[in-house]
Image: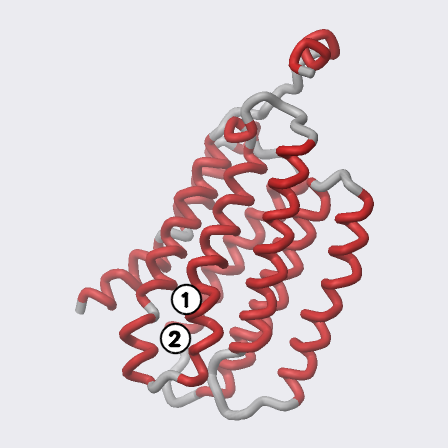
C-alpha cells in the first residue's frame, strides 16, 4: 500500500517542474532548459504509459523502457556537453557516448525476456554520472561565477547526478532479482525520482543568472 502511494506521488511529481517551468517561462527561455522541460514531459508520459501496460506484457514494457533510456541519455548528455568548455572533456564525451548507443541497439536486437533494459540503463548511469563529475570539476578549476548554486545549470546537473547515482546499483541488479525483490527495492527509484523533480523545480524557479561585468570578474580572479 505504501509503495503504491509512493509510486503515485513519484508519477505526479513530474507535474511540478512542468507547471513551474511554464509559470516562470520568462526565466526559462534558454534552449538547454527547454530540452530539460522536454525530458520531464517525456518522463511523465512514459510513467503513465508504463502504468497502463498490463504486468504480463513484458515486451511492450521492455521497448518502452529501452526507448526512454535512449532519450534520457541523449538529453542529459547533450545538456552537459553544451555546458562544458574544455575541449578535451568534450572530446571524451563524444568518444564515449557511442558505447551507450551500441549497447542500446544490441539490447534491442537480443532481448532476453526481461521487461527492463538493465545493461543500457546501467551504462547510461555510469557515463552520465562521470560527465556530471567532469562538469563540476571544470567549474571548480575555472569558476565562471562566485556561487555556482545560484545557477539553473547547477540544480539541473545535481538533480541528474543524484538520481542516477542513487539508482545505479538498483538498475545493475534488477535482472538478478525476483519480482518480489524488485517490488521491495523499486521504491528507491520512486523516492529519488521525486527528489529529482523537486530539484528541477528549483532550477526552473530561480531567476536568470546575470554574469558580472568584466571589472567584477577581474576582481574575483
* Badge 1 element: helix
Q: Residues within 10 Å of mark 2 (few under 14, many from 20)?
A: few
* Picture disc at residue 48: 1
* Badge 2 element: helix
Whether pointer 1 and pointer 2 mark residues with C-beta atoms closer than 8 Å, the reply is yes
Residue 179: image location, x then y, percent: 33, 84
What residue sits 68% from the left and 83% below the top?
106
* Picture disc at residue 4: none
Q: Which residue is mark 2?
A: 52
The relative height of residue 99 versus residue 18 in the rendered view (above or below) is below
What residue sits 63% from the left and 83% below the top?
107
Residue 54: image location, x then y, percent: 37, 83
The relative height of residue 210 versus residue 126 in the rendered view (above or below) is above
The relative height of residue 211 versus residue 193 in the rendered view (above or below) is above
Residue 51: image location, x then y, percent: 37, 72
User: Which of the 4 image quadrants contains residue 77?
Assistant: bottom right
What residue sits 43% from the left and 50% below the top?
196
What residue sits 69% from the left and 52% below the top?
78
The relative height of residue 126 versus residue 32 in the rendered view (above or below) is below
Instruction: Specify whether 18 is left or right of 26.
Output: left
The Cα atoms of the two marked residues, 1 and 2, are separated by 6 Å
Q: Quadrant of the C terminus?
A: top right
Count of marks overlaid on the render: 2
Amino acid at each position: 500500500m505504501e509503495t503504491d502511494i509512493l509510486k503515485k506521488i513519484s508519477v505526479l511529481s513530474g507535474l511540478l517542474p512542468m507547471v513551474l517551468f511554464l509559470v516562470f517561462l520568462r526565466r526559462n527561455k534558454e534552449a538547454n532548459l527547454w530540452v530539460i522541460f522536454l525530458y520531464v514531459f517525456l518522463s511523465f508520459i512514459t510513467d503513465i504509459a508504463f502504468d497502463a501496460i498490463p504486468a504480463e506484457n513484458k515486451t511492450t514494457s521492455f521497448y518502452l523502457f529501452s526507448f526512454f533510456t535512449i532519450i534520457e541519455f541523449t538529453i542529459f548528455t547533450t545538456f552537459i556537453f553544451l555546458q562544458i568548455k574544455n575541449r578535451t572533456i568534450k572530446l571524451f564525451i563524444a568518444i564515449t557516448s557511442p558505447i551507450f548507443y551500441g549497447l542500446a541497439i544490441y539490447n534491442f536486437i537480443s532481448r532476453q525476456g526481461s521487461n527492463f533494459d538493465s545493461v543500457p540503463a546501467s551504462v547510461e548511469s555510469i557515463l552520465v554520472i562521470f560527465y556530471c563529475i567532469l562538469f563540476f570539476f571544470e567549474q571548480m578549476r575555472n569558476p565562471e561565477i562566485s556561487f555556482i548554486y545560484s545557477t539553473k545549470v547547477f540544480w539541473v546537473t545535481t538533480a541528474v547526478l543524484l538520481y542516477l547515482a542513487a539508482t545505479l546499483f538498483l538498475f545493475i541488479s534488477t535482472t538478478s532479482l525476483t519480482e518480489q525483490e524488485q517490488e521491495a527495492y523499486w521504491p528507491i527509484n520512486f523516492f529519488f525520482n521525486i527528489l529529482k523533480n523537486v530539484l528541477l523545480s528549483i532550477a526552473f524557479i530561480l531567476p536568470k543568472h546575470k554574469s558580472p561585468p568584466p571589472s567584477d570578474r577581474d576582481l574575483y580572479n
